[in-house]
Image (tube, rainbow, N blue to C red):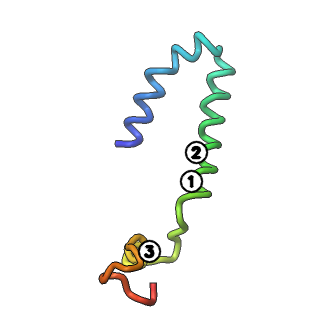
């Protein structure tokens, strides 16, 4: 759904941006947004490589939740 939504937004705005920013400006804008998105994801999304789904679930529970185990 997110991919479809992003494609819809790009499809809606692409021709308008081509008229306003020209071809090079439009691609620089979309490239810049991609780099900013990559930076945000690297900075804010926790690393899950090597963790089980149970460990990931435990990390999202509040500290006082009775379902949370002490080893997570």
Q: Give yes or no for contact between labels 1 and 3 (Cβ–Cβ under 8 Å).
A: no
Identify the residue position indicated by label 3 in the image: 59
Q: Nearer the viewer, mark 3 or mark 2?
A: 3
| Residue 34, x across and y down, in percent | 60, 40
Which label belongs to residue 41? Answer: 1
3D distance between C-alphas at marks 3 and 2: 23 Å
Which label belongs to residue 37? Answer: 2
- Residue at point 33%, 78% (across, down): 65
3D distance between C-alphas at marks 1 and 3: 18 Å
- Viewport quadrant of the N terminus: top left
- Residue at point 52%, 14% (across, down): 16
- Residue at point 64%, 34% (across, down): 31
The quarter of the picture where residue 5 lies is: top left
Q: Secondary structure at mark 1?
A: helix
3D distance between C-alphas at marks 2 and 1: 6 Å
Q: Secondary structure at mark 2?
A: helix
Q: Give yes or no for contact between labels 2 and 1 (Cβ–Cβ under 8 Å).
A: yes
Residue farthest top in this picture:
19
Q: Earlier in the sequence, mark 3 or mark 2?
A: 2
Q: Sort mark 1 into few (<14), some (14-19) or many (20+) by Cα contacts within 10 Å.
A: few
Q: Secondary structure at mark 3?
A: helix
- Residue at point 52%, 71% (across, down): 49
Q: Is residue 51 left or right of residue 68?
A: right
Q: Earlier in the sequence, mark 1 or mark 3?
A: 1
Q: Sort mark 3 into few (<14), some (14-19) or many (20+) by Cα contacts within 10 Å.
A: some
| Residue 62, x across and y down, in percent | 39, 73
| Residue 28, x across and y down, in percent | 67, 28
């Amino acid at each position: 759904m997110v991919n479809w939504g992003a494609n819809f937004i790009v499809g809606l705005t692409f021709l308008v941006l081509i008229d306003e920013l020209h071809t090079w400006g439009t691609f620089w804008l979309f490239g810049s947004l991609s780099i900013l998105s990559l930076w945000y994801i690297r900075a804010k999304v926790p690393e899950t490589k090597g963790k089980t789904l149970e460990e990931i679930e435990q990390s999202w529970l509040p500290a006082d939740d009775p379902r949370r185990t002490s080893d997570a």
